[in-house]
Image (spheres, rainbow, N blue to C red):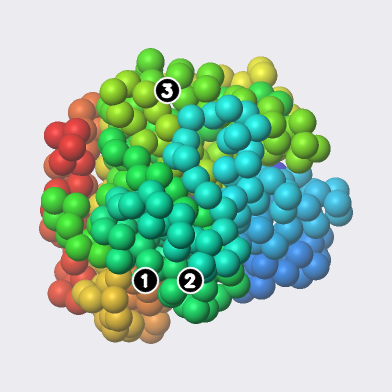
Amino acid sequence: MNILILGGGGREHALAWAVMQNPKCDKLIVAPGNAGIAAIADCASLDIENGVAVVNFAEENAIDFVIVGPEAPLAAGVADDLRAAGFSVFGPSKDAARLEASKSFTKEICDAANAPTAGYGHFTDADAAKAHIRENGAPIVIKADGLAAGKGVIVAMDEQTALDAIDDMFGGEFGAAGAEVVIEEFMEGEEASYFILVDGEDCLPIGTAQDHKRVGEGDTGLNTGGMGAYSPAPVLSDDIAEKAMAEIIRPTMKAMADRGMPYQGVLYAGLMIKDGQPRLVEYNVRFGDPECQVLMLRLGAQALDLMQACAEGRLSEARVNWADDHAMTVVMAANGYPGSYEKGSVIKGLEALPETAHEMCFHAGTSAKEGQIIATGGRVLNVTARGDSLRQAADRAYAMVDQIDWPQGFCRRDIGWRAL
Ligand code: AMP
Ligand code: GLY
């Protein structure tokens, strides 16, 4: 089978690694890929948000199965274009991708499904939004309605911060994404991510994880795309996970099908858990990055079979072969991230790292230049390990981190602290 993966970050390296474990895969192309992916698959440059270009590429390369990594091509309708051309695709339609691309759409679906989530108001003008903030007070959460690359959410602990956020959003700071805002009730609790495959009808959970969004140890400092993750997340106990399936996931997926936009792909539910009750924070229509890295290390080759069963509507007969294991990924980022950082520094020591079924250094922002690996992004490496316990996974991951010679990079030393 010839497989095409769209994307070029750590998530896609982990997907490529899992796909390559499966003997069904004859040929793998990743577009655009990165230096780590190039070591295990072919990389191709391709405008992955251009449906016509992707369809042509898939035809030219006799592709049998396409896996879409990031949200942007999904929101642009690339999965629809591929399916219309007859390809088997893992990833939701443009309509269904609105679960991530529009916060107000997700809130409406939650209302229709009676799913527990934060109370909210939806505003298209600044004065009404400010009146709502004054009426409800802080803490309160302001969200740009559209895709804002993870930067469109302001958790305001005081009223003035919330009012300023409204000025910023309606003042154009978030572009078109900020022309509408959702204002939410602040939810207390502990966050965790739940990943569920959905084939339009059936839902199959494939794992839990916890991300570390803040740049600094002890969850301090600026928000990032994620500085590390581990799986499973003990806060999402079997009981709470079953509650989330029964009260949130299945009812919202049914509401999507009822509206004629059945969801197909991986659903990433961000949940807030307090007093044994899960509430939905947000949906994403793709794997989390770096959560995907720990899920793929745990699932291995079966990930491809599961994604295919999902794309072909066969989830009712699919089973996950669970192992009683733990995985952790530590993100190494360029000094300065998530602010400004330099590109082009050389990373040494990577060739000596172990590459086993329980230890992998996935690449995020790297490229190869004159035989060397150089850093080309903010988040650069995802040092990932598996073990019988989270402690063992952490020890293995940090032992690898210590072998990497990259003075221009840093990582958090406390990934997994809540569970350890
Ligand atoms: P989102 O992009 O919607 O996931 O928001 C980013 C982050 O903001 C979440 O991961 C939470 O940490 C926080 N957040 C979002 N909505 C709320 C809420 N209603 N209450 C508390 N925290 C929130
Ligand atoms: N790690 C958070 C995300 O992928 O959205």
- Disc 2, disc 1: CB below 8 Å? no
Residue ID for mark 2 = 169
**Residue 57 seen by the camera:** no
Q: Mark 2 is on which residue type?
A: Met
Q: Quadrant of the C terminus?
A: top left
What percent of the width, then of the height, locates residue 159? 31, 60
Q: Which mark is residue 164?
A: 1
Q: Secondary structure at mark 1?
A: helix
Residue for point 51% across, 55% down: 182
Residue ID for mark 3 = 241
Q: Earlier in the sequence, mark 2 or mark 1?
A: 1
- What is the quadrant of residue 75 in the picture? bottom right
Q: Is residue 401 left or right of residue 213?
A: left
Residue for point 40% across, 44% down: 185
Q: Which mark is residue 383?
A: none
Q: Secondary structure at mark 2?
A: helix
**Residues under labels 2 and 1: Cα distance?**
9 Å
**Residues under labels 2 and 3: Cα distance?**
35 Å
Residue for point 78% across, 52% down: 80
Q: Earlier in the sequence, mark 1 or mark 3?
A: 1
